[in-house]
Image (cartoon, rainbow, N blue to C red):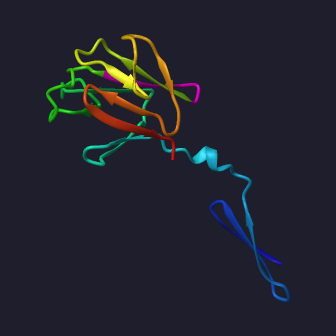
Amino acid sequence: MQSASFGETTVLSDESAGETTVLSNTSYSQSLTPHLIREKTKQVVFVDKSVLRIGAEQSYADFYLGDNPAISRSHADIVMRDGEFYIVDNNSTNQTFVDGRVIQPGIEVKIDHGTIFTLADEKFEFKLY
């Protein structure tokens, strides 16, 4: 019997039995790719750091929203800690809403896959995959 490895898939071949593919035990939850989807433009922004700053100040924001004057210079942050995600309003002028409810500035609000949040009048969906 011969064995060949192709990343996480191993193909075992036995001339009399054909081929058997053995898949690894890797859980799909380990391949999470957290990201935001901007409803207006369908733009996808990956959350690839512990704090993702969102705002209208290009020199400060990781996700720059300069085309919407209702967005504050430093509107909100997406915070990743211990595998969980939170949104924090940075005392924005036009507020931040999670699932339709206004959140208080400076307070971390947990977000999960499918959470809808709005910065001023700009709607986003948070996705894990």
Residue at figure coordinates x 68%, y 49% from the top left: 27
Residue at figure coordinates x 30%, y 27% from the top left: 119
The x, y position of residue 101, in whole percent, is 41, 21
Residue 82 shown in magenta: yes
The answer to whether 72 appears left or right of 26 in the picture is: left
Q: Nearer the viewer, residue 113 or 3?
A: 113
Residue at figure coordinates x 25%, y 20% from the top left: 74
Q: Residue furthest front?
A: 100
| Residue 15 in which image quadrant | bottom right
Residue 103 shown in magenta: no
| Residue 39 in which image quadrant | top left
Q: Nearer the viewer, residue 101 or 26?
A: 101
The x, y position of residue 55, in whole percent, is 24, 26
Query: Does residue 56 lie above or below 23 as drawn?
Result: above
Query: Does residue 19 lie above or below 104 as drawn?
Result: below
Q: How many marks?
A: 0
The answer to whether 62 appears left or right of 24 in the picture is: left
The quarter of the image holding the N terminus is: bottom right
The x, y position of residue 36, in whole percent, is 39, 39
Q: Residue furthest bottom?
A: 16
The answer to whether 104 appears left or right of 119 in the picture is: right
Majority secondary structure of magenta residues: strand
| Residue 94 in which image quadrant | top left
Query: Does residue 6 lie above or below 35 as drawn?
Result: below
The x, y position of residue 95, in whole percent, is 29, 18
Q: Nearer the viewer, residue 50 or 7?
A: 50
The range drawn in magenta is 76-83
The answer to whether 56 appears left or right of 33 in the picture is: left
